[in-house]
């Protein structure tokens, strides 16, 4: 998203010059090259997204002489600049607007007249949050003694990283260890038939900074990003239609019972869905965009959808452009990821990789944990992460969150399981909040009662799921959670009741 980080024209010129320098020259050139005055360092981290900046800070705290290389003028990567953070700002504030603009406030005894949407102010609030948080990382680097080098980092040897700067100059960093934390980028539409201009045909980046609310928006992909950004513009007044290739919304890992309930709730809010439908092309006709689709099971059934803005959300892919993997003999897998072992080492033992460039879900918190564990491992510590205990959240309203196994996964694995459920409609705090959509669903081993998965749809699900993460990390049973006293009245009591239902067969309040 061009406007979010407030880079300014000169900053973007530097980025364009940097990209031109990267694409237009080979890795080894005879241009001006300077050497770091710091001598050999312990660790060079390439990338300052959630994984890279956290790893850099932790490494410095552990006594490693650390340099972080980041091509953008601001720190925080996609997540803070054009991803997690700006989208959550828009999701939060658009929800307030929706409450005021619908019957919601009226039902609470709040009558609003003369309500107006000030989109520039809403976008400014988003940019302010981004600026404060990215600036905060720069402060943390200084506070912890992390050296920051701005430019594109390329591995030019097992113990060296060459940084191409915006002015075309190069700096050579000598290092004992290298950590790849370059994250991911938007996956282009397959076949290249839809070209993103970030104005009317946009990726998630452009969707965060539209200059006006489109009358009609088509979203390709009803996964996490598509649903979040589709919700934002739907709340602000756009007619949003999501086209999804699969037969369910929410992406990989979501429990099907939750997905179906979630879709029904979003449809009540005004979102429309075209399921098991694929987009074949998009063409501009005047100031409109015509999106051509066909059904997955019957290609003869075609439909054209008209919109003002087309949002392409078909996933993300590892970002390894001009990283120099080939120079040190590191091969990527068939999905462009960097293979690593359990200590995050690549095929070159002193070169590590974490986050979106390696296998696993592309989640900021997963990258952060990997970054901490990786540098602890470099210092000789134990390295262990249970990916079954990494939660996922969709920050719509209601929120959807899950961790561990879905019911479909347990069936496929032949696990003997039991279910405990509790609806928010029977929860006292949710009733008081007039926010009763959704439920908690617990999955546990039928013989041992150990928690295998937790699935929540409801207000604050993204906060509540962390109780499940803690329980699962410690191998808790449903009885363990059911016997923990929960404050009343809170929505988290629904989590306790669902565990009670799984353990004892029945909850108390339903």
Image (cartoon, rainbow, N blue to C red):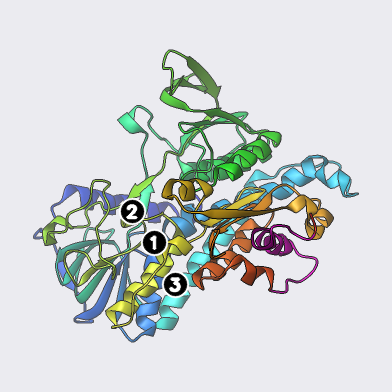
Q: Which region shows up in magenta?
A: 484-508
Q: Nearer the viewer, mark 3 or mark 2?
A: 3
Magenta stretch encompasses residue 30? no
Q: Earlier in the sequence, mark 3 or mark 1?
A: 1
Per the model, the C-alpha gap separating discs 1 and 2 is 8 Å
Q: For mark 3, what is the residue? A: 138
Indicate the quadrant containing the C terminus: top left, top right, bottom left or bottom right: bottom right
Q: Nearer the viewer, residue 323 or 494?
A: 494
Quarter of the figure with residue 160: bottom left
Rendered location of residue 239, percent (x, y): 63, 30
Looking at the image, which is closer to me, 35 or 146?
146
Q: Count neighbours of disc 1 (C-alpha within 10 A) and say few if under 14, some if 14 to 19, many if 20 or more.
A: some
Considering every residue shown, the one lying at the far right of the view is 109
Vertical order, 67 against 507 (above or below): below
366 left or right, relative to 270: left
User: Regarding mark 3 in the picture, which secondary structure is present there?
Assistant: helix
Name the foreground residue: 260 vs 311: 260
- Estimate the x, y position of residue 163 in percent, counting from the top left: 23, 64
- Say which element carries label 1: loop
Q: Gap in Å between the C-alphas at discs 3 and 1? A: 11 Å
User: Contact (CB < 8 A) between labels 1 and 2?
Assistant: yes
Q: Label 1 near label 3: C-beta < 8 Å?
A: no
**In this figure, which residue is indicated by the disc labeled 1?**
73
- Per the image, the residue denoted by label 2 is 15
Tell me, yes or no, whether the highlighted magenta stretch contains residue 507: yes
């Amino acid at each position: 998203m061009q406007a979010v980080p407030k880079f300014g024209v000169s900053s973007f010129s530097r980025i364009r010059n940097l990209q031109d320098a990267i694409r237009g020259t080979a890795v080894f050139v005879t241009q001006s090259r300077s050497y770091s005055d710091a001598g050999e360092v312990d660790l060079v981290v390439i990338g300052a997204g959630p994984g890279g900046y956290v790893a850099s800070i932790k490494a410095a705290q552990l006594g490693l002489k650390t340099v972080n290389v980041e091509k953008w003028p601001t720190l925080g990567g996609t997540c803070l600049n054009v991803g997690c953070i700006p989208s959550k700002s828009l999701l939060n504030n658009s929800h307030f607007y929706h409450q005021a603009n619908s019957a919601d406030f009226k039902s609470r005894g709040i009558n609003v007249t003369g309500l107006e949407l000030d989109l520039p102010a809403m976008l400014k609030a988003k940019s302010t949050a981004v600026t404060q948080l990215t600036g905060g990382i720069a402060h943390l680097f200084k506070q912890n003694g992390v050296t920051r080098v701005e430019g594109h980092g390329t591995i030019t040897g097992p113990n060296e990283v060459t940084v191409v700067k915006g002015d075309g100059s190069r700096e050579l960093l000598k290092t004992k260890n290298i950590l790849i934390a370059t994250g991911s980028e938007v996956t282009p539409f397959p076949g290249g038939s839809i070209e993103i201009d970030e104005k009317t045909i946009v990726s998630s980046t452009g969707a965060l900074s539209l200059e006006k609310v489109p009358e009609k928006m088509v979203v390709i992909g009803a996964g996490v990003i598509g649903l979040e950004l589709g919700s934002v513009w739907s709340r602000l007044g756009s007619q949003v239609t999501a086209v999804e290739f699969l037969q369910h919304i929410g992406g990989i890992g979501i429990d099907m019972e939750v997905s179906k309930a979630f879709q029904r709730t979003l449809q009540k809010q005004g979102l429309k869905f075209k399921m098991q439908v694929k987009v074949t092309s998009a063409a501009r006709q005047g100031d409109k965009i015509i999106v051509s689709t066909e059904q997955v099971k019957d290609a003869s059934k075609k439909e054209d959808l008209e919109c003002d803005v087309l949002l392409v959300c078909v996933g993300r892919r590892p970002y390894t452009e001009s990283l120099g993997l080939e120079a040190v003999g590191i091969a990527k897998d068939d999905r462009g990821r960097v293979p690593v072992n359990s200590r995050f080492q690549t095929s070159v033992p002193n070169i590590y990789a974490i986050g979106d460039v390696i296998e696993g879900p592309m989640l900021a918190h997963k990258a952060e944990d990997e970054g901490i564990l990786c540098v602890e491992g470099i210092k000789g510590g134990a390295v262990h992460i249970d990916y079954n205990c990494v939660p996922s959240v969709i920050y719509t309203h209601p929120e959807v969150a899950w961790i561990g196994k879905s019911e479909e996964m347990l069936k496929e694995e032949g696990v003997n399981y039991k279910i405990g459920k509790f609806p928010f409609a029977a929860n006292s705090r949710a009733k008081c909040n007039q926010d009763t959509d959704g439920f908690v669903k617990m999955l546990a081993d039928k013989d041992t009662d150990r928690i295998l998965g937790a699935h929540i749809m409801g207000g604050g699900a993204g906060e509540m799921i962390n109780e499940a993460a803690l329980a699962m990390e410690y191998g808790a049973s449903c009885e363990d959670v059911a016997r923990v006293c929960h404050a009343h009245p809170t929505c988290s009591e629904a989590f306790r009741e669902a565990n009670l239902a799984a353990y004892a067969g029945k909850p108390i309040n339903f």
